[in-house]
Image (spheres, rainbow, N blue to C red):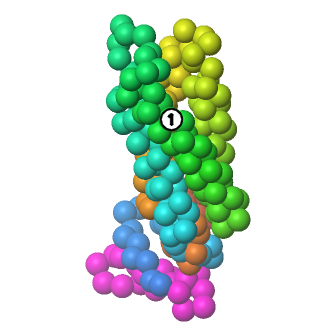
Amino acid sequence: MIVASTQGGSRVQEAPQGGPQVPCFDFGETMTASFDQTPKPRAIRDPLYASVIGLTSLAVLLQGLWAGLFVREGKDFDATSTQANWVQVHDWGARIAIVLAFASLVVAVWRLRARKELLLGTGALFLLLVLESYIGGEIGDHENWPAVHIPLAMALMALSVWLPSRAVHGWRTPQGGEPRFSREHLDESTAERR
């Protein structure tokens, strides 16, 4: 590293190979800069994944809407009423959500392996949707299962909102060089002057 004196007691430190100059003011201690050769951050985003996970989230959201059309607090299910039609819609919505979640998982494995949070989140979404669908299909035989089915649906809703927002937000990977100031360099410089 080359150090050149300037006016006013400040110095300019130049990185090897003509890198950027870093001003360093002399207040009794010397600070040096090291340059990390890792690349600058760039966003990893995949429009295909964002689209498929967005459709999955829409299906999960509609599941809540359709459930609200047939779930009545304090009333038993009436298979002869219009409730039965909405139960069928809810059932098919679950199947569609599972297929879309599986497609999202395939895209995440195929194109976003570096994004571990999306990979794990999408896998969890798929598995929890399968579990939720099983519990929902057995509710008629187990009257206490809605106590598990509905809170799990709320957790799925939260996960299905988080995944698309995280996918669009992007993730930073290293690319390019940024100067890093290190206390070790400061301590080494001070020791050398003594």
Residue in the image at 36% along x and 85% along y: 6
Q: Where, quadrant-wise, is the N terminus in this rendering?
A: bottom right
x, y percent for residue 145: 56, 14
Question: Compared to 87, does 142 lie above or below?
Answer: above
Where is residue 77 shown, x and y percent of the image? 44, 16
Residue at coordinates 51% horizontally, 16% vertically from top-left? 146
In the image, taking residue 127 as reference, residue 176 lies left or right, namely: left
Query: Is 89 situated left or right of 129 in this image?
Result: left
Residue 158 % position (x, y): 45, 37
Residue closest to the eye, 20 or 139: 139
Residue identified by numbered label 1: 88
Q: Nearer the viewer, residue 163 or 30?
A: 163
Asked if the stretch drawn in magenta spans residue 10, the answer is yes
The quarter of the picture where residue 73 lies is top left
Q: Which residues are magenta?
A: 1-19
User: Looking at this rendering, what residue extends furthest in the left direction?
Assistant: 8
